[in-house]
Amino acid sequence: MKYKRANVNIAILKYWGKVNNLINLPYQTSISVTADNFYTLTNIELDPKANKDIVILDGKALSGISFTRVSHHLDALRKHFKRKEYCIVNSINRVFIKAGYASSASGFAALTAAYVDAIGAKVSKKELSQLARLGSGSATRSIHGGFVIWHRGKNHETSFAEKLPVKWPEFRMLFTIVDPSVKKISSRVGMQITIEKAKSYADYVKQSNESVEPLIEALKNNDIDATGRIAERAAELMRNVMLEAGLEYHTPTTQQLIQKVKAIRSKHKIPVYYTFDAGPNLILFTLEEYVNEVIRLLPEVEISVSGVGGGITNANS
Ligand code: DP6
């Protein structure tokens, strides 16, 4: 079968909040790195005779809310391209779903690219990123490889992702598995609660957006310390507003691991930094030459190493 492959991306500067829920218009400009080890493969066939979509993920037909989310996104794409046919969607997730890395980013990016392919439309990567955003905010960034900026924009037209002019092949992500349970409150719901309840949310947005230029500079300079410092601050600022809103995604193990990462940095002089999303796992940023040493110093944690991955591609299976 012919698939579209989209890789997972990890935000170095986070997206956490929507100005507009219908089109996933964010408050923050975010910057991510695309990973090369976790991805989704999706094939779509149009079925002109069907009266609803069929979505098969890892060999099982989806139902309930997971199905509805996919089908809603297909509705948005049908509306955009003025098409009527329902779809048979076949997806394979090579993502640690059980480890809390269930990624709507790779899923909705692959879904969007596969739909565009199925109808034979020709769209630019910019347009593809705008369309992927309608399914999931972070999917906007998974259209591109390397280091990617998602401009928050003011409307559908101006909110899109593009690749940053950064070459940094030595950059590595270490996906840790702190807690293999599925996250309890989705990002979607968590963001909404945060906006409603966190008093310093407006300050957070301001601080986050102020990090855009320094982060671009750090990435262009391949400066792991500056990149790491901005990444940790961005994650902690996000966590502060989550906590203000009563949302705790970390476990005690997450916090212990953060202390260990800091200790590795100070005692062993290894440039290793952490980030996290709406879950208990840490993703560590470091350089290729330090990967083995970091793994050796964290024997108690399961780690999957990832390099910098590419954007949407064709794949066979
Ligand atoms: C914490 O993209 O999953 O990972 O737009 O509602 O699908 P929806 O949310 P989603 O949120 C990701 C939030 C984050 C930070 C980030 O990836 O920027």
Image (cartoon, rainbow, N blue to C red):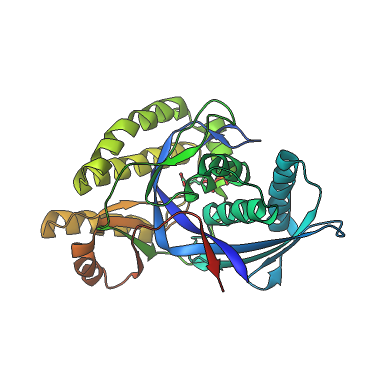
Q: Is residue 208 above or below residue 168?
A: above
Q: Position of residue 228 (x, y in %)?
A: 26, 47
Q: Position of residue 33 (x, y in %)?
A: 38, 50
Query: 35 or 277: which is nearer to us?
Result: 35
Give the side of residue 136 with respect to residue 266, left or right: right
Q: Is residue 225 above or below residue 61?
A: above
Query: 17 or 135: which is nearer to us?
Result: 135
Q: Position of residue 255 (x, y in %)?
A: 34, 55
Q: Is residue 211 visible?
A: no
Q: Position of residue 66 (x, y in %)?
A: 68, 57
Query: 111 or 81: which is nearer to us?
Result: 81
> Going 37% across and 62% down the picture, which residue do you hit?
175
Give the side of residue 22 with respect to residue 252, left or right: right
> Going 52% across and 33% down the picture, which residue do you hit?
159
Residue 282 in which image quadrant:
bottom left
Q: Is residue 25 above or below residue 301?
A: above
Give the side of residue 299 with respect to residue 28, left or right: left
Quadrant where the N terminus lies?
bottom right
Q: Is residue 18 above or below residue 92?
A: above
Quadrant where the C terminus lies?
bottom right
> Going 57% across and 44% down the picture, which residue do you hit?
128
Give the side of residue 99 with respect to residue 121, left or right: left
Q: Is residue 216 visible?
A: yes
> Going 59% across and 37% down the picture, which residue do you hit?
24
How many labels were placed on the picture?
Answer: 0
Query: 90 or 241: which is nearer to us?
Result: 90
